[in-house]
Amino acid sequence: MVPSLEIITVVGVVVLVVLIWFFVRLRGKDRVEEVLAKHRGTARVCSRACLLEGMEQIPVALVLTADAIYYENSDLQASIELPLIEEVEYDDETATGHTVAGKVLRLRAHNHVFEFTLDLATAKQWEAALPARRIDRAKAV
């Protein structure tokens, strides 16, 4: 029995969707590498990281320059100016209590928390370039 044209068409469409999905995922990784390559000459530290937004982990290029931290991928281009960062922490668990492999870089700026997961070697580079610090609330008042 020969498969009908409709079945072949449906299988072809499914295969095409899967191929497009793989291409988009691979292209996203290429975009992270492009961002890292663009900033390597001027950045104090640049590396791969994952931005934690709720339960979602978003792969990003994380870049520390003299005046800001940039986090970018194919869908996102954002930054935090260093003077706006009130606290910098390095921890082995997220703010919600989930343990991670590696370290979490936690930044607080204007009552918003930004969390990035880093592998251990990269976290050491970040800690050397951007040491942990807490705002002294008594002096700020």
Image: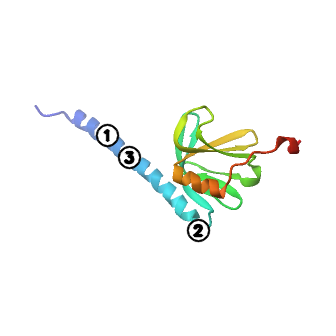
Q: Are marks 2 and 1 in contact (CB under 8 Å)?
A: no
At a point 54% along the width and 56% down the height, the residue shown is 47
Find residue 90 and report its horizontal and vertical position in percent. 63, 45
Determine contact: label 3, label 1, CB under 8 Å: no
122 shown above or below 55: below
- Quarter of the image with the N terminus is top left
Which residue does the image show at 56% across and 45% down from the upper left? 103
Disc 3 or 2, which lies upstream in sequence? 3
Q: Kindly report the distance in space between the C-alpha atoms of the residues bearing marks 2 and 1.
A: 44 Å
**How many numbered marks, from 0 up?**
3
Disc 3 versus disc 1: nearer the observer: 3
Labelled pair 3, 2 in contact (Cβ < 8 Å): no
- Where residue 39 sits, quadrant-wise, is bottom right
Kindly identify the residue that appears in the image at 73 percent across and 54 percent down: 82
Front position in the image: 119 or 11: 119
Looking at the image, what colour scheme do you see? rainbow
Would you name the residue on which mark 2 appears? 41
**Residue 61 on image: x %, y %:** 55, 53
Does residue 104 appear in the picture of this structure?
A: yes
